[in-house]
């Protein structure tokens, strides 16, 4: 499968930008998690540097071959990295990594070149570091001997704003005076976390959710059988990352697990809440990706409850928990499901902010009880 098949409207827009020679200096590629934004950014970079005469991507020239392995001199990829307290302002961000983290990053880039949906997630990486942006500022004005456009891709760009936001402010200086023949693409699931001054200096391209048929095709390409691929594609609601995690999960009772963890969240029970807090806090410490996966499952549960509440049709693959979803809607007809989803999203973001997870989860449980009753949360002063 190629990117233009997944996001045809987006690809048409990007192709028109290239054809009309109206390439901007900075873009934000935003949209739901798993909507192929990172792949779109890589393909756009490849398009702008293709040496073929087809008007599109030839995939055969020297430039395209280098982009295929993410090793083109015009390409720079910035991802969240662990903060090294011993690093000074002149430190190279890669030199500050441990050997294990450097090997992980190298292997991740290699995997990304072979699988555009692979998510680069360096352990204990909580932000786009200030040294990554300082290094960019030092190198961005250097000339290359390569034909085409210099492209800087910043994945998980919302993490520029973490900490004191110094990385975002440093990037802002580049956006205010961008060098010629250079394009920055900020890729994010959470555009609203970016500084308004950064947003105002970028052109936004919003990626819609992938269709279930496309997600299903991706899962089948990864060796997941047709029936399970169809079920997971429908359940994941256009999030291909989650669909892959669901499809590759060996738990055959996944929907029952979703139902069980949702009951722990909703039902006021000292024992149930203690188990919820302890088990998820341990996951957050030992295996953050599994912690996020559990929260994503809860988001799925509330999403499908909302879909049923709004009169949506039954979804293939969730029949076993549909009765529970209907009962939930009957019991909590005024529940603010949108705000509950935001709370769950915040509990994921709290990992990057080094919040105390047991306290975060305790507040989550208490706040959700308020929202289930249709009440508003008290503003935090």
Image (cartoon, rainbow, N blue to C red):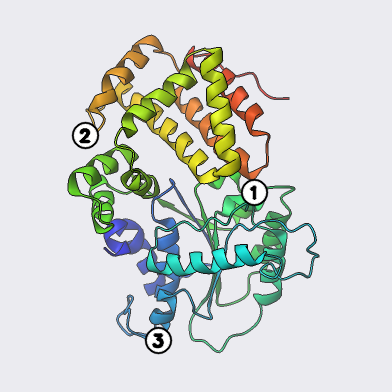
Which numbered dot is residue 62? 3
Badge 2 density bin: few <14, some 14–19, many ≥20, Cα 10 Å: few
The Cα atoms of the two marked residues, 1 and 3, are separated by: 38 Å
Q: Secondary structure at mark 3?
A: helix
> In terms of image quadrants, where is residue 14?
bottom left
Q: Secondary structure at mark 2?
A: loop
Which numbered dot is residue 316? 2
Badge 3 density bin: few <14, some 14–19, many ≥20, Cα 10 Å: some
The Cα atoms of the two marked residues, 2 and 3, are separated by: 45 Å
Q: Secondary structure at mark 1?
A: loop
Is residue 146 rendered to the left or right of residue 136?
left
Badge 1 density bin: few <14, some 14–19, many ≥20, Cα 10 Å: some
The answer to whether mark 1 and mark 3 are in CB contact below 8 A is: no
Q: Position of residue 209 (x, y in %)?
A: 35, 46
Residue furthest bottom as drawn: 145
Is residue 261 rendered to the left or right of residue 190?
left
In the picture of the structure, the residue carrying the numbered disc 1 is 195
- Quadrant into which the N terminus falls: bottom left
The answer to whether mark 2 and mark 1 are in CB contact below 8 A is: no
């Amino acid at each position: 499968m190629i990117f233009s098949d997944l996001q045809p409207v987006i690809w048409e827009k990007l192709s028109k930008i290239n054809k009309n020679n109206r390439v901007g200096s900075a873009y934000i590629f935003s949209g739901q998690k798993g909507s192929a934004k990172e792949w779109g950014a890589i393909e756009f970079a490849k398009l702008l540097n293709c040496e073929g005469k087809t008007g599109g991507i030839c995939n055969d020239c020297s430039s395209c071959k280098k982009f295929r392995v993410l090793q083109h001199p015009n390409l720079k990829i910035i991802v969240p990295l662990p903060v090294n307290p011993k690093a000074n302002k002149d430190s190279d961000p890669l030199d500050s990594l441990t050997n294990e983290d450097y090997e992980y990053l190298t292997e991740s880039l290699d995997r990304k070149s072979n699988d555009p949906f692979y998510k680069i997630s360096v352990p204990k990486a909580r932000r786009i570091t200030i040294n990554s942006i300082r290094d960019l500022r030092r190198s961005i004005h250097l000339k290359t001997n390569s034909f085409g456009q210099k492209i800087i891709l910043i994945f998980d760009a919302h993490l520029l704003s973490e900490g004191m936001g110094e990385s975002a402010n440093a990037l802002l200086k580049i956006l205010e005076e961008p060098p010629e023949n250079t394009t920055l693409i900020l890729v994010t699931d959470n555009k609203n976390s970016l500084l308004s001054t950064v947003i105002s200096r970028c052109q936004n391209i919003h990626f819609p959710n992938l269709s279930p048929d496309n997600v299903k095709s991706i899962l089948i390409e990864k060796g997941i059988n047709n029936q399970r691929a169809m079920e997971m594609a429908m359940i994941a609601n256009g999030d291909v990352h989650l669909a892959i995690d669901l499809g590759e999960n060996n738990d055959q009772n996944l929907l029952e697990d979703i139902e069980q963890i949702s009951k722990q969240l909703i039902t006021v029970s000292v024992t149930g809440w203690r188990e919820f807090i302890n088990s998820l806090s341990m996951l957050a410490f030992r295996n953050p990706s599994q912690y996020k996966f559990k929260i994503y499952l809860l988001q799925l549960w509330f999403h499908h409850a909302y879909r049923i509440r709004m009169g949506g049709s039954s979804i293939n693959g969730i029949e076993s928990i549909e009765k529970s979803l209907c009962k939930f809607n009957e019991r909590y007809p005024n529940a603010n499901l949108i705000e509950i989803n935001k709370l769950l999203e915040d509990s994921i973001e709290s990992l990057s902010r080094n919040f105390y997870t047991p306290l975060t989860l305790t507040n989550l449980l208490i706040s959700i009880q308020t929202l289930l009753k249709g009440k508003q949360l008290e503003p935090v002063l």
